[in-house]
Image (tube, grey):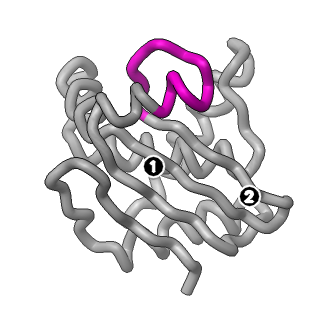
Amino acid sequence: MAAITFSTIDVEFEVEDKGGLTQWLTRVTTEEGCFIGRLSYRFCSDDYLLTMNRSHLNHDYYTDVITFDESRLPLIRGDVFISIDRVRENALEQKTGFLPELYRVMVHGLLHLVGYGDKTGEEVLVMREKEKQALRLVH
């Protein structure tokens, strides 16, 4: 089983079906020709992630996910920080459920680790398509 961990920092939140999520994330990684050495998901608040965004990326805005990549492809190593507040807000705005949005953000962080970007319009289109493909595989 891949070395994937799930933890919280400053929010009351519990990931359900960690085994199923680990299998799904491992499958997505494998289909991209990579394998997981270490992957941690850390769930936090908007305020916590805003502070990280300011201090590590020099960005002064809320975000749903920040990925810290230590990968040496094809070996995946990294930390994915996710704002549960932002995921809830995104789900309301986009009229999706909380879990589908959570899974989308989780796989978005993973896709950064396997080499996909989202800075240009073309990269965003590829990222969205990869997210859709991955979401078809969840549970």
User: How far across and how far down the image is residue 55, in percent?
Assistant: 55, 28
- The secondary element bearing badge 2 is classed as loop
**Residue under the point 31% across and 45% down:** 44
From what the image shows, is residue 124 above or below residue 12?
A: above
Give the side of residue 112 with respect to residue 131, left or right: right
Q: Nearer the viewer, residue 47 or 122?
A: 47
User: Could you tell me how many numbered marks the image carries?
Assistant: 2
Q: Mark 2 points at which residue?
A: 32
Type of the residue with mark 2:
Glu
Between disc 1 and disc 2, the foreground one is 1
Which residues lie in the magenta part?
52-64
**Residue shown at the point (23%, 68%) measured from the top left:** 16
Q: Label 1: state its secondary structure.
A: helix
Q: Which quarter of the figure is the C terminus placed in?
A: bottom left
Q: Where is residue 122 in the image (x, y as percent from the top left)?
A: 73, 18
Residue extending furthest toward the left: 12
Q: In this view, does 105 lie above or below 90?
A: below
Q: Are marks 1 and 2 in contact (CB under 8 Å)?
A: no
Circle 1 sits on which residue? 106
Residue 102 within the magenta-colored segment of the rendering = no
